[in-house]
Image (cartoon, rainbow, N blue to C red):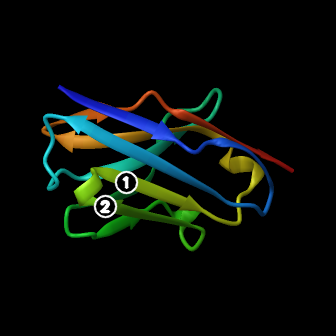
Amino acid sequence: QVQLMESGGGLVQAGGSLRLSCVASGNIFSINPMGWYRQAPGKQRELVATINSLGSTNYADFVKGRFTISRDNAKNTVYLQMDSLKAEDTAVYYCSLNRGTTYWGQGTQVTVSS
């Protein structure tokens, strides 16, 4: 069993920053790739960024240069630093862990006011 707990969401003005955290617990390994996805109202869930055990990262084009994903394997935690936020970044952000199957957190709301 794998549990993922996100935190750090909230309301921020356009141009501001937020840092999301996700702590993984249960039957996990530090080699498991992790990532962040988001889902805006009326839209499908979409990839934001992923990171593997070696720290190799992958970003969606719409966040490149603004968001940074990182992980602390000793703490089983993945982070998403979000800078230069835009109104269109408003969504529920979900943490994911891939261990053959994909596990999801419950999500954290990010609202960016223009």
Q: Residue furthest bottom?
A: 65
State the residue at coordinates (74%, 56%): 86
Q: Look at the picture and state if 10 lies above or below 81.
A: above
User: What's under tag 1, amino acid-wise?
Assistant: Val
Q: Secondary structure at mark 1?
A: strand
Q: CA distance from mark 2 to mark 1?
A: 6 Å
**Left or right of residue 10: residue 59:** left
Residue 48 showing in the rendered view: yes
Q: Earlier in the sequence, mark 2 or mark 1?
A: 2
Q: Look at the picture and state if 76 lies above or below 10.
A: below
Coordinates of residue 49 in the picture (x, y in percent)? 42, 57
Q: Are marks 2 and 1 in contact (CB under 8 Å)?
A: yes
Q: Secondary structure at mark 2?
A: strand
**Left or right of residue 89: residue 72:** left
Coordinates of residue 108 in the picture (x, y in percent)? 55, 35
- The image's mark for residue 50 is none
Q: Which residue is mark 2?
A: 72
State the residue at coordinates (36%, 50%): 35
State the residue at coordinates (29%, 41%): 24
**Left or right of residue 89: residue 101:** left
Q: Which residue is mark 1?
A: 78
Near mark 1 (Cα within 10 A), the count class, few <14, some 14-19 or many ≥20, is many
Coordinates of residue 31 in the picture (x, y in percent)? 14, 56
Residue 62 showing in the rendered view: no
Near mark 2 (Cα within 10 A), the count class, few <14, some 14-19 or many ≥20, is few
State the residue at coordinates (27%, 42%): 97
Q: Look at the picture and state if 5 lies above or below 49.
A: above
User: What's under tag 2, amino acid-wise?
Assistant: Asp
- Foreground residue among 71 and 113: 71
